[in-house]
Image: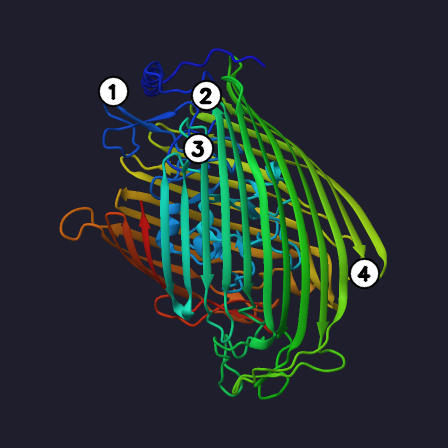
């Protein structure tokens, strides 16, 4: 495939091309490759390669200049830092370095500056101001990041780190500390055509911090509510005089209590990374991390009456009650990963990438749980049982990508060809106790009876699962005109699912293959408006079996989406508005004759609208706002559920957050921010007769920066509103987070 002469270059592009040529003549480019896909050198990305430039006006606000006098700045790295809150580019939606304004799918990017302003405790907090996403579904949880996208569960197959899946199945889960992240990409809608196994709602791609070009020295200490305290550091920069080696060492240690009596949340996290750039065309980055968690369950499946509504005696379970019991509430996990990102630019046309990672997670989850309702008519005694899960997961991912940018004489193309492979292995041991023999004492909501003796457990599931996926994919981003882009994507998946039932001494094997596709069309007007339409299908093979050791069929479905993206002229602001119609088939529903079994009878449809605005009003004033409304309906399944909305799923979300720093004068460096998060009502039962009320939560931050110091006080749920995050059923409700105040002091040099 030979590159052809380019189409005529618009005047603005000619100015930029001439400017880039002048920079090249001055010797500022490294190597002969055009490096259209290479990572550009800038703070936070490893040095080397050709410098890519974008036109800006002399004020630097990203608008098209009125005159021919332009400045230049390095193009944003889609895997690196963001200037303010407004991202320009992404790799997540197309796996190619593509401007967001040319991407026919709804995407939100959360940068490090926004993460630092919010001080999120977990990923669910970080995405709280993103359209379409309902995070912390089951309240604060130090074990797992639970989240829904467009009404569908996405934390199982939709959590990614650096473009590779962190597959969560059963009670084996990966959780990433937000201090180790550079940015978070939220992709809404099916993404199976590029990533393989995946659900309908979308995915969250966590982008790790990588070695910076310039020396970085950062340390932070903090603490706050529930006796929490932490120490964090971030060190990096060049490791040699020739500019070939770069490093970064990021770490954080947390210790302290939680909103639940007698339950701590302790964590240690460290992430060494190294980048090697032998020349301007080749980059190799080694990524690794190690994390240890020592905590427990904050929520123990509480009754609807006593949390959302009062009991028959007018009582409520206190948010601080440790229904699992401090002496019987343990969660420990050791997780680690090691891998790399490799990229080589061959010439003006071809670029090759390979991303690889091996990860493991060993965890023990042992607690008394509710979920059985009350044991007495006065609703004062919560029935409990003991649950124990020991999980050992191993996950290997490798993704090979070849990108070609060329002109065929009629159209310009960005072609992506890929081959990826995933191998997931899980030792899944689950046991329970208290149903036979010695019972677990009930929990008294009037006088908490802590210190209950443990009871023996008996295994009911001892499985060794192996899931493999091989995928071949192809994508062509075709410039039909300088303004009109057509995206055509297709993928073939070949999967196998093996379940070894050690209790029954049986083995089940299943193969499932599928073809998924995506088509998108987007038109870019000169004044920043970009309407688009897209269609995508998805394929999600299921791991494991039902209660009778029968394998599940893959879930499938499709989505139609239409929207508008708008880069507001004269402002560094980005607006996305989208409408979607999303369908899921073969969804799992509870077996009414066996609570331990699941049936594949369900079909669910989500039709809705969402909007996201991100703006750097000035360099010192940032705003992010979102609105989501959809109608989620069960269209097939249990007769009593048809036409109903699934439980624990709010259908309306809205949020706005603004942060301002005084730039000059006696108060220079002093800043403040505030936000509000609205979550609409949801249902606690299949018949939709029991509701979980809507809520509005307020957040605030006050901060002061001087020289290299920064002091901040953050408050989440400032009014300390008591609320239930969601209910799975009448006997499984989960309290949301109480007011959390964090004070932090950092120094950067």
Of label 2 and label 1, which has the lower sequence position? 1
Q: Residue at x 44, y 57 (%)?
A: 125
Q: How is the image coloured?
A: rainbow
Q: Which mark is residue 698?
A: none
Q: Which mark is residue 68?
A: 1
Between circles 2 and 3, the one closer to the viewer is 3
The crowd level at tag 2 (other Cα within 10 Å; few <14, some 14-19, many 20+) is some
Work out whether 623 lies above or below 595. above
**Res. 624 visible in picture:** yes
**In the image: residue 498, left or right of residue 96:** right
- Residue named by callout 2: 481
Q: Are marks 4 and 3 in contact (CB under 8 Å)?
A: no
Give the spatial CA distance, label 2 vs label 4: 56 Å
Q: Residue 745 versus residue 529: which sits nearer the camera?
A: 745
Under tag 2, what secondary structure?
loop
Of label 2 and label 4, which has the lower sequence position? 2
Of label 2 and label 3, which has the lower sequence position? 3
Q: Which mark is residue 46?
A: 3
Of label 1 and label 3, which has the lower sequence position? 3
Percent position (x, y) of residue 76?
39, 33
The crowd level at tag 4 (other Cα within 10 Å; few <14, some 14-19, many 20+) is few
């Amino acid at each position: 495939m030979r590159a052809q002469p380019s189409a005529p270059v618009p005047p603005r592009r000619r100015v930029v091309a001439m400017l880039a040529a002048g920079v090249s003549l001055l010797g500022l480019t490294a190597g002969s490759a055009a490096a259209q896909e290479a990572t550009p050198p800038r703070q936070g990305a490893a040095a080397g390669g050709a410098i890519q430039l974008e036109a800006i006006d002399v004020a630097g606000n990203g608008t098209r200049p009125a005159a021919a006098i332009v400045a230049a700045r390095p193009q944003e790295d889609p895997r690196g830092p963001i200037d303010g809150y407004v991202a320009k580019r992404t790799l997540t939606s197309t796996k190619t370095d593509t401007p967001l304004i040319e991407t026919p799918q709804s995407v939100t990017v959360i940068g490090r500056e926004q993460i630092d302003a919010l001080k999120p405790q977990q990923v669910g907090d970080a995405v709280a101001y993103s359209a379409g996403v309902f995070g912390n579904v089951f309240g604060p949880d130090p074990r797992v990041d639970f989240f829904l996208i467009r009404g569908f569960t996405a934390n199982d197959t939709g959590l990614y780190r650096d473009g590779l899946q962190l597959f969560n199945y059963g009670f084996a889960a990966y959780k990433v500390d937000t201090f180790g992240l550079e940015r978070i990409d939220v992709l809404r809608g099916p993404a199976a055509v590029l990533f393989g196994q995946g659900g309908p709602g979308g995915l969250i791609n966590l982008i790790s911090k990588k070695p910076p070009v310039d020396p970085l020295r950062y340390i932070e200490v903090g603490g706050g509510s529930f006796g929490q305290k932490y120490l964090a550091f971030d060190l990096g920069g060049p490791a040699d005089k020739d500019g070939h080696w770069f490093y970064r060492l990021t770490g954080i240690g947390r210790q302290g209590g939680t909103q639940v009596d007698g339950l701590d949340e302790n964590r240690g996290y460290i992430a060494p990374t190294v980048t090697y750039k032998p020349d301007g065309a080749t980059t190799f980055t080694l990524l690794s991390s190690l994390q240890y968690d020592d905590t427990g369950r904050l929520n123990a499946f509480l009754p609807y009456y006593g949390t959302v509504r009062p009991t028959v005696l007018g009582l409520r379970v206190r948010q601080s009650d440790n229904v699992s019991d401090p002496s019987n509430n343990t969660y420990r996990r050791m997780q680690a990963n090691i891998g790399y990102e490799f990229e080589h630019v061959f010439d003006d046309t071809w670029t090759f990438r390979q991303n690889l990672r091996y990860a493991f997670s060993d965890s023990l989850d042992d607690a008394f749980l509710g979920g059985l309702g009350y044991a007495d008519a006065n609703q004062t005694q919560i029935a409990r049982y003991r649950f124990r899960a020991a999980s050992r997961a191993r996950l290997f991912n490798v993704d090979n990508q070849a990108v070609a940018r060329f002109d065929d004489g009629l159209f310009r193309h960005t072609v992506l060809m890929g081959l990826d492979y995933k191998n997931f292995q899980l030792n899944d041991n689950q046991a329970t106790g208290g149903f036979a023999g010695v019972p677990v004492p009930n929990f008294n909501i009037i006088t908490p009876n802590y210190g209950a003796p443990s009871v023996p457990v008996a295994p009911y599931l001892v499985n060794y699962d192996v899931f493999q996926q091989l995928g071949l994919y192809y994508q062509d981003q075709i410039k039909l005109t300088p303004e009109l882009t057509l995206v055509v994507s297709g993928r073939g998946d070949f999967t196998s699912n093996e379940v070894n039932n050690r209790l029954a001494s049986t083995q089940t094997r299943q193969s499932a293959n599928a073809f998924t596709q995506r088509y998108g069309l987007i038109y870019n007007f000169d004044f920043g408006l970009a309407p688009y339409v897209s269609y995508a299908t998805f394929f999600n093979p299921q791991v494991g079996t039902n209660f009778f050791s029968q394998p599940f069929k893959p879930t499938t479905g499709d989505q139609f989406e239409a929207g508008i993206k708008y880069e507001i002229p004269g402002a560094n602001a980005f607006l996305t508005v989208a409408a979607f119609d999303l369908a899921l088939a073969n969804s799992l529903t509870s077996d009414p004759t066996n609570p331990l079994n699941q049936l594949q009878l369900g079909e669910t449809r989500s039709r809705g609208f969402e909007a996201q605005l991100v703006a750097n009003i000035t360099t010192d004033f940032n705003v992010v706002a979102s609105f989501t409304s959809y109608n989620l309906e069960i269209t097939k399944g249990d007769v009593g559920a048809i036409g109903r909305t699934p439980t624990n799923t709010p259908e309306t979300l809205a949020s706005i957050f603004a942060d301002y720093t005084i730039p000059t004068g006696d108060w220079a460096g002093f800043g403040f921010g505030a936000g509000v998060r609205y979550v609409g009502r949801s249902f606690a039962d299949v018949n939709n007769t029991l509701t979980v009320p809507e809520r509005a939560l307020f957040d605030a931050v006050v901060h002061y920066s001087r020289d290299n110091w920064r002091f901040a006080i953050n408050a989440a749920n400032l009014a300390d509103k008591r609320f239930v995050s969601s209910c799975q059923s009448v006997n499984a409700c989960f309290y949301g987070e109480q007011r959390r105040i964090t004070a932090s002091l950092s120094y950067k040099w």
